[in-house]
Image: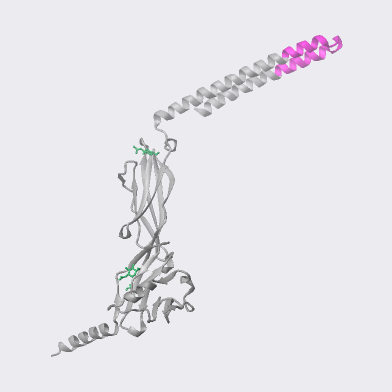
């Protein structure tokens, strides 16, 4: 008979639990941020609730009043201000015993357990868990080059349930991520998910990052097009670039030197013209100036040539 005592205690406690909690726990309700949601509550037997008091509460809040209906009208004096203007009962449904609550413009902070209670029929207490789902549109960042490939990073924030992140190419094929998705969770129970992908240059560098909350069939995505020139060049095109640059630099230098010579010649021409107009007394001085200027120009050309060689060397 020793074994029967714990058995009885167990049975008694089970009876105790089931008799004190006449509460009805229904399946959690899931809503997305911004949605309108109906928290269901109905009297077991089709009894009119029109002349009853209906108390909707959130026991974890202070004040805990969500919505109060009594004396055949709403009494929202004690209502918690976070619900102001967002709650209503279906008045035409009350006579069918339907005391469901409509909550509009759902916020993240609305997540929690709600109780529906009709005091005069106190066996009718329903607990409804509201889960609020949210996920931000992901953001894609072109992070860095790795060899001749580009590393992309995708980031999104989400609250219940944990979002799943995936990459796709232009043809909609799944791209394997570079390592596992990183997930961090904040105090409100919301997540930040980050995933990397390494992509080579291809015909169509369009990539998609998608976040999904499978349980609530919620999906958001973003596409990025990586321009061709973002990808580091292969060696072949590298040489081509250098060659073009060198040829370009040489051409520019040649034009500069030619321009300098032309300028010098014009200047000389002017000087000769002026020399004729001036008096013989000034002739000596002018000739001297001319020689100076010619020397100066020569040194400038010398500098120019040196500079051009230097530039070409630098480019190579
Ligand atoms: C209660 O009324 C609402 C609004 O008309 C409705 O959506 C819901 O299905 C009703 N509940 C039941 C159990 O009939
Ligand atoms: C709501 O109730 C569920 C079980 O019914 C429990 O797991 C959860 O922690 C409760 N949430 C809050 C905020 O009290
Ligand atoms: C290539 O990318 C463009 C966007 O840049 C897209 O509109 C187009 O559908 C893509 N083509 C293929 C074949 O995927």
Asked which colour scheme the image uses, the reply is one colour
**Residue 84 belongs to the span the image colors magenta:** no
What's the magenta region? Answer: 268-295
Position in image of residue 40 (x %, y %): 33, 71
Residue furthest bottom as drawn: 1
Quick one: 216 or 4, which is closer to the camera? Answer: 216
* Residue depicted at 58% across the width and 22% down the height: 253
Count of numbered marks: 0
**Residue 292 belongs to the span the image colors magenta:** yes
**Residue 291 appears left or right of 78:** right
Quick one: 190 or 231, which is closer to the camera? Answer: 190
Position in image of residue 182 (x %, y %): 37, 56
Residue 187 in sight in this render: no
- 3 over 189 or under it: above or below: below
Per the picture, the main secondary structure of the magenta-coloured stretch is: helix
Quick one: 110 or 100, which is closer to the camera? Answer: 100
Quick one: 13 or 34, which is closer to the camera? Answer: 34
* Residue depicted at 86% across the width and 11% down the height: 281
Q: Quadrant of ligand 2?
A: bottom left
- 77 over 291 or under it: above or below: below
- 245 over 35 or under it: above or below: above
Residue furthest left as drawn: 1
Query: Which quarter of the rendered picture does the N terminus lie within?
Result: bottom left
Residue 129 in sight in this render: yes
Position in image of residue 90 (x %, y %): 38, 71
* Residue depicted at 70% across the width and 17% down the height: 295
Res 19 → quadrant:
bottom left
Position in image of residue 242 (x %, y %): 47, 27
Res 116 → quadrant:
bottom left
**Residue 285 appears left or right of 297:** right
């Amino acid at each position: 008979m020793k074994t029967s005592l714990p058995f009885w205690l167990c049975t008694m406690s089970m009876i105790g639990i089931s008799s004190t909690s006449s509460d009805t726990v229904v399946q959690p309700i899931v809503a997305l941020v911004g949605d309108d949601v109906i928290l269901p509550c109905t009297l077991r037997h089709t009894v009119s609730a029109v002349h009853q008091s209906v108390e909707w509460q959130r026991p974890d809040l202070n004040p805990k009043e969500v919505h109060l209906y009594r004396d055949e009208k709403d009494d929202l004096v004690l209502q918690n201000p976070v619900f102001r203007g967002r709650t209503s009962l279906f008045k035409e449904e009350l006579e069918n015993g339907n005391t469901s609550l409509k909550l509009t413009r759902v916020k993240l902070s609305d997540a929690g357990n709600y109780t529906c209670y009709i005091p005069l029929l106190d066996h009718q207490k329903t607990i409804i868990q509201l889960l609020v789902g949210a996920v931000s549109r992901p953001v894609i960042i072109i992070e860095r080059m790795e060899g001749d490939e580009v590393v992309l990073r995708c980031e999104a924030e989400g609250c219940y349930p944990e979002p799943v992140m995936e990459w796709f190419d232009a043809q909609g094929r799944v791209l394997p991520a570079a390592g596992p998705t990183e997930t961090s969770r904040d105090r409100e129970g919301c997540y930040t998910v980050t995933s990397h992908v390494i992509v080579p240059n291809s015909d169509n560098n369009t990539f998609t990052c998608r976040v999904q909350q499978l349980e609530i069939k919620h999906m958001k995505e973003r596409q990025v097009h990586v321009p061709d020139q973002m990808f580091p060049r292969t060696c072949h095109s590298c040489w081509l670039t250098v060659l073009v640059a060198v040829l370009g630099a040489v051409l520019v230098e040649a034009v500069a030197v030619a321009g300098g010579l032309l300028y010098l010649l014009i200047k000389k021409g002017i000087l000769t013209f002026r020399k004729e107009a001036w008096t013989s007394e000034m002739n000596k001085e002018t000739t001297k100036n001319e020689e100076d200027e010619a020397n100066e120009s020569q040194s400038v050309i010398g500098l120019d040539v040196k500079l051009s060689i230097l530039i070409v060397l630098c480019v190579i």
